[in-house]
Amino acid sequence: MDEAPHLQPMGDSAFMVRFGESISPEIHARVAGALRTLDSAREPWVVDLVPGYASLMVLYDALRASPEEVRRWLEETLPRAWPEPPSRRAIEVPVWYHPAVGPDLEPLAREKELTVEELVTLHTAPEYLVYMLGFRPGFPFLGGLDPRLFSARLPSPRVAVPAGSVGIGGQQTGIYPVRSPGGWRLIGRTPLRLFSPEADPPFAVGLGDRLRFVPISEERYRALGGEVPA
Amino acid sequence: MSLRVRKPGMLTTIQDLGRPGFGRWGVSPCGAMDPLALSLANLLVGNAPGAPALEVTALGPELVFEEEATFAIAGADLGATLDGAGLAPGLAHRAHVGQTLRFGTRVWGARAYVAVAGGGLGQSARSFLGSTATDMEAGLGGLSGRPLRAGDALRLKPQPPFQARAVRGAREHGYPQPWEEVRFIPEASPRISSEAQERFVSTRFRVSSRSNRVGYRLEGPALPVVPSALQLSEPVAPGTIQLPPDGQPIVLMADRQTTGGYPRLGQVIRADVPKLAQRWLGDTLSFRAVTLDEARQSLRELQAWLEGAVP
């Protein structure tokens, strides 16, 4: 049996439930299991449940519940949680890997002493796990990156990274769902829309989904609705 | 007919109490920086406390009433006038067709809220996940996720008959005044040294000019940081106080991201979030550590004040 998670009060409106200090599928399964169990036992004063890589934040309405009451609920509910098996959903993300949409592709390949083709092969080989979403609506933080591709963030973030950009930041890889500033190294772009506010649900990718990048040609990228910078 | 924007001011957005509850999708809560003042403005015009209203920042807009309407201003005193006549915050007012609401010199505070009767100013706003709060970072809610522009017209709902409501009691400006001290609950972390904790509570910080709705950056002598190789991103809460590598703390506010990787000094207590939201660029601030009990007691008192504020 896994060690009980650590409960830490965060101010007067939240608790952090910690399951460990590392990125691993096992810890993720515990976070996801706890999320599912807390959801099903949800009390009306729960404001939000937000998973991280190895943690889960429980935000509560301090006018409606005391910290003692929240702690008791967590202590009673969390032991009923079982690690959540990985999602049955496997999502293919078509990516055009090209300097036109991935300005860091060639410099990163040179830095790693790889050809662009080798870099793409390494990036498309693993099945990634969606550990969490954060930063912007629908931004998936993906674990499973080949350590040969671990790379430092840009010294200074770009002011505007186009939606659909695929990037590498540290040990993680991910996709920018909306145009935003960003410091990750950009290696390609997907025409897939990860976030469509008008759709129901608005998010194409969820926690625990398995994700695979598939290289596509410029023609295919355009045919799927991808935009090419002038 | 509507409320017409002649000048947008520095930053005027449609806000309500935000869209909490979608953190697992990376959706920021947004909503009013000062939820207390938003609620107060709404109560003064007979709306539900969380109805959509305008959040006016420091240098206010110029708005023309194209129809008769009941409105109220609460929060900061930004020198509002209606056709040149001074308007006291904390009172319901009736505007006639063609009258202009202007803001002038900031007297105190940072954010004023303009509520209009009939259920709020959300008619022209786009709702996303149950809220019309403007999310400028993701371009959601409000007017396509952007601040007001000159020429915008905010549709009003049918106006109920005027009722002269005012904040009860003799509190100046009809709103609890912000003061310099912000209370917080410290968080023990191996990534924060005891020296950093001690210096945090003994330092007077200035609100940096790089502060915004995402967070308040605090200027002062840099606090010592503990180098850390691996910083796993973790969820953040309202009022999370982060210590980035430059040693200058950041307090996360309404438009914060849902996760962050910096070490944390603690959390601003919920009762003091409105107070912090009313500190403006260049203002000074200090932090005092309190217990959970004091935090809860203060929140209950503030809520009781709000519930009794408008008879």
Image (cartoon, coloured by chain):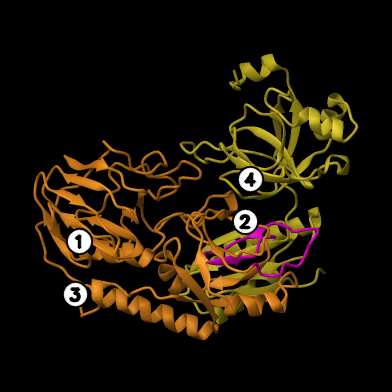
Chain colours: A yellow, B orange
* Mark whose residue sits in front, 4 or 2: 2
Category of crowding for the residue at label 4, using alpha-carbon neighbours closer than 10 angstroms: few (below 14), some (14–19), many (at least 20): many
Q: Give left or right: position of B98 versus A55.
A: left
Give the residue type at disc 2: Thr
B5 and A147: which one is in front?
B5
| Helix, strand or loop at mark 3 | loop
Residue A51 appears in which quarter of the rendering?
Answer: bottom right
Pointer 2 indicates a residue of which chain?
B
Question: In the rendered structure, which segment of residues is drawn in magenta?
Answer: B222-245
SS state under label 1 = loop
Q: Separation of disc 4 and disc 2 at Cα?
A: 16 Å
Tags 2 and 1 on a common chain: yes
Measure the C-alpha gap from mark 3 to mark 1.
12 Å
* Residue B295 magenta-highlighted: no
Nearer-N-terminus badge (3/1) = 1
To which residue does mark 2 refer?
Answer: B259
Which disc, if any, is residue A206?
A: 4
Residue at mark 3:
B311
Dot in front, 1 or 4: 1
Label 1 Cα crowd, 10 Å radius (few <14 / some 14-19 / many 20+): many
Whole-percent x, y for residue B24 in the image: 59, 53
Residue B45, labelled with which disc?
1
- What is the C-alpha distance between the residues marked 2 and 3? 40 Å
Give the image location of residue A75, x and y in percent: 65, 76
User: Which of the image's four quarters has the N terminus of chain B?
Assistant: top left
- The subunit letter for the residue under badge 4 reads A
Q: CA distance from mark 4 to mark 3?
A: 46 Å
Chain for mark 1?
Answer: B
